Amino acid sequence: MKGIHYSRYGGPEVLEYGELRDPKVGPDAVLVKVRAAAVNPVDWKCREGYLDGALDAVFPVIPGWDVSGVVVQPGAAVTEFSVGDEVIGYVREDFLSRGTFAEYVAAPVRTLARKPRNLSFEEAAGLPLAGLTAYQVLVHALEAKQGETVLVHAAAGGVGSIAVQLAAHLGARVIGTASEHNHDFVRSLGGEPVAYGEGLAERVRALVPEGVDAVFDTIGGDTLKTSVNLLAPEGRLASIADPEVLSHGGRYCFVRPDAEDLERLSALAEQGVISVHVSRTFPLERAADAHRLNQEGRTRGKIVVTVDWEDEHTAP
């Protein structure tokens, strides 16, 4: 099969496009013909070795954890999916090697859910990691409730844009930080935008003098420190970007594969509660350009890599 891989840590230049060994399909996995794979910040962080202390890399590494595609072969023990099923997945294993930036991926069923029928493959590929992150932080960690006020940082980004929609669906008032050119976008998602930068605390306090009930931090550093001072009494704080949140009494969250959570997200997408904004697509062979753009950190919504197919439902 064709795919993207890297044989050492480094910048986007270490990504190579070429022939790779076809994946083996274990008893609890299905072979997915990849239609699209979203790019996430964790992809380039893995590529540059920032997660080496947590995840072994078995080179060559195929990057990518997000996928949308079509099942072409179920494993021997699989009853959940059949040939031809359209699926999405957050296909993270406990080591780096067998990612989604390829024509095929062998995905454990614990990482998969059915693709929302109303989303394109490109949109659907952007849902798993970002959607699960938003869901697990808001529902499990912060326990956001109707009538509360939730502050979401980087509200126009991949995770933030879904978090705004989900928090609004839960009945919360949502304030979202974003660059001024993204304020209309944040409003369209159901949030009240505030600008980044100096004076952020004052701008939020002007909207919520008593403080916010929950903060969803996606940036860390100074933004996290500012957020601590914006909490109402008994307010909750969670971060996906900075473990220092623990020293402030908050929760540090790293998204995990969860088929039930992903099925709920798929259902919410089909109900029109959650949409995925795809800002740019790249063909598979240009995955390095997709990584470069994502690493700049100014993307609205998601960047997606696409795989073209003529024959939909055949195994390699």
Image (tube, helix red, strand yellow):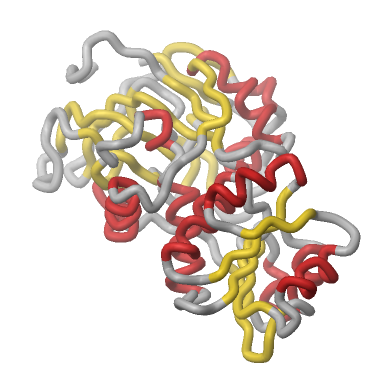
Position in image of residue 170 (x %, y %): 43, 68
Name the residue at 15% across, 36% down.
74
x and y, in percent, of residue 238 in the image? 61, 71
Which residue is the extreme one toward the right? Answer: 198
Closer to us: 110 or 204: 204
Where's residue 256, x and y in %? 43, 58
Q: Of residues 89 and 121, which is closer to you in this image?
A: 121
Residue pictured at 29% horizontal, 36% vertical: 118
Which residue occupies 43% across, 55% down? 132
Residue positioned most to the bottom = 233
Q: Is residue 11 above or below residue 254?
A: above
Q: How many marks?
A: 0
| Picture quadrant of residue 260 | bottom left
From the top left corner, tell me how far across and down residue 271 is, in percent: 29, 50
Quadrant of residue 242 within the rendered picture: bottom right
The answer to which of 66 and 162 lies nearer the viewer is: 162
Relative to 158, does residue 226 appear above or below in the rendering?
A: below
